[in-house]
Image (spheres, rainbow, N blue to C red):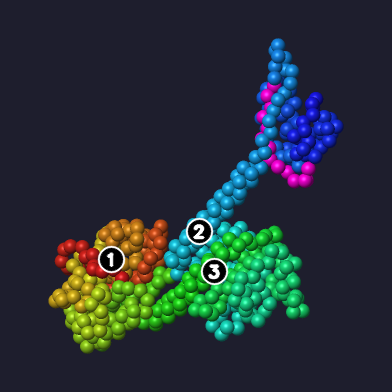
Amino acid sequence: MAEDSPEWRWITGQSMEDYLADGWLTAIHPNDRDRIDRDWRQCIRTGTVFDGSYRVRTKTGSYRHYDVRVVPIERDGAIIEWMGASTDVTGQREADEMRGRLTEQLSAAALRTSRLQQATSLLAEALSVQQVTAVITEVGRSSIGADRSAVALVDKDRLRLRIIKSEDTADGRADLLEELPLGARSMLTEAITLRRPLVFGSAESMRRHFEADGKAEFWPPDSAEQAWVSLPLITSGAPFGALLFAFTGPHQITDEERVFLEALAGQGALALERAKLYEREHATAETLQRSLLPDRLPDVPGIALRATYKPVSIEVGGDWYDAFRLPDGKLAVAAGDVMGKGLTAAAGMGRVRNALRALALTDPRPAAVLAGLDRLFLATELDEQVTTVCYLVVDPQTGEGVAGNAGHLPPLLLGPGEPPRLDQTEAGTPLGWASPRRQYPFSLPPGNTAVLYSDGLVENRRRGLDTGLDELVAVAARAPARVVADPQRLIDYLVDNMMTGYEQDDDVTVLVLQMPARQPGERQGPAGHSGKAGRSRGLGRG
């Protein structure tokens, strides 16, 4: 600089000698100095206007923001001096930075609020404990950047914690225990005991907490983690479990993150409690339903019987099947569906199945059995309950029989030398609906097969009933002869091909009744099947 600048020296506290000797650069913030020196020298070489922003160290030692504009003054085509002005914009810059920080905080808060809303929606759809755990850990970890997580639930005896790993969490931890004594020192048990969140920003702070009473043991004893946050899961005023998030590097949980995690833990606790109740009811209903199905199918000379029951993974319905010998040696076969889920459907299925057996032993004719079930249904079941039954009686010696259908799906019929088809006899109404019960001749010649099934095999959210029935016939038509000849392989083939590409959302029940082909020299039974025209579609969906 060639001339003194008292204003500059008053701001910076520099002497005139320091200022004139380019000491003005030393007052500029080190992070801005090289940039300003370079830009200023470029303006001198090119004679262009200098516009810059930089921080200046004041005589108090603090830095303030300045916007500077310097213009060249020319005379006779030559620059004779530079004149400029510096404006203190510290207040504006601080306001801008404050707005930026607030914007970031608001954006982060909005993102966490959005994720909390997402968690609310996902938790409402999650039914199992594992599904709820996956939602809690995924939303929590993605929101605060945690590396690892665990959810622990207190067992029914309140002696141990059962630690659950989310299936969606591939953290590969070998030291994650499946169970932990409730009295053990750990971040999970400590949160339950204290009934409040625990936050440790470093391994040292965590150790100080656990070593305060002289006990240095805590879970996990050897860990690469360096920061933790543990929260109790509380429902109905009592600890239900705990939630843990961990970081492999130092991390300080902010107040906003803590509020978010407490809200997530509150929602997660309610969802986990609901899921445990649901799983308990599911297990009870499935046990009841399986106990009401026959332990084994009867061994009937001349007839092959196979069946399968495939419950949906998260719900249990009222699908059932049965097969038993009648006093005259004939075989009674039935399949049915009670609309609904859970214990109500399973109990209703048990009542219908037991009543069908009792009625069949008295008068096995399908018309009489279905009429008797109508009377039982009207006396014991709810008006809105929809229950369907397909019931048939077959002579194992001849394959001749008689059948009746109360709103159930039409049996699939397969025979040698002809394409698979659905039983064309019109189905009646579901049980309890006012309609005369009828029966029709049913014939199963040697080498022929009848398949009874529930709507879970052919219908789902993406496939309508008519489309599913057509697809069932097409799938059966593609079955190799060796598969059709083996009832168990036929069941597996039909279930696999009908369910591929679709999410199972209802129980699947399949029963195969087959009259094996007779060897040369054996007596042949009469062939053919009579019935009314028109495809049966059944009524109601369980």
| Residue 70 included in the magenta stretch of the image | yes
Q: Nearer the viewer, mark 1 or mark 2?
A: 2
506 and 197: which is toward the camera:
197
Q: Earlier in the sequence, mark 1 or mark 2?
A: 2
Q: Residues within 10 Å of mark 3 (few under 14, many from 20)?
A: many
**Image quarter for residue 84?**
top right
Residue 18 in view of the camera: yes
Q: Earlier in the sequence, mark 3 or mark 1?
A: 3
Q: Amino acid at mark 1?
A: Leu
State the separation of the CA atoms marked 3 and 1: 51 Å
State the separation of the CA atoms marked 1 and 2: 53 Å
Q: Residue furthest right?
A: 17
Q: Amino acid at mark 2?
A: Thr
> Where is 302 relative to 489, above or below?
below
251 and 356: which is toward the camera:
251
- In the image, residue 390 lies at what x, y percent? 25, 74
Q: Residues within 10 Å of mark 2 (few under 14, many from 20)?
A: some
Q: Secondary structure at mark 2?
A: helix
**Image quarter for residue 330?**
bottom left
Residue under pointer 1? 412
Residue under pointer 3? 265
Q: Nearer the viewer, mark 3 or mark 1?
A: 3
Residue under pointer 2? 113
- In the image, residue 473 lies at what x, y percent? 29, 60
Q: Which residues are magenta?
A: 59-72
- In the image, residue 426 lies at what x, y percent? 18, 67
Task: State if disc 3 and disc 2 touch (CB < 8 Å).
Answer: no
Q: Amino acid at mark 3?
A: Ala
Q: Secondary structure at mark 3?
A: helix
Which residue is at 73% across, 38% downward? 32
Which circle marks residue 392 in the picture?
none
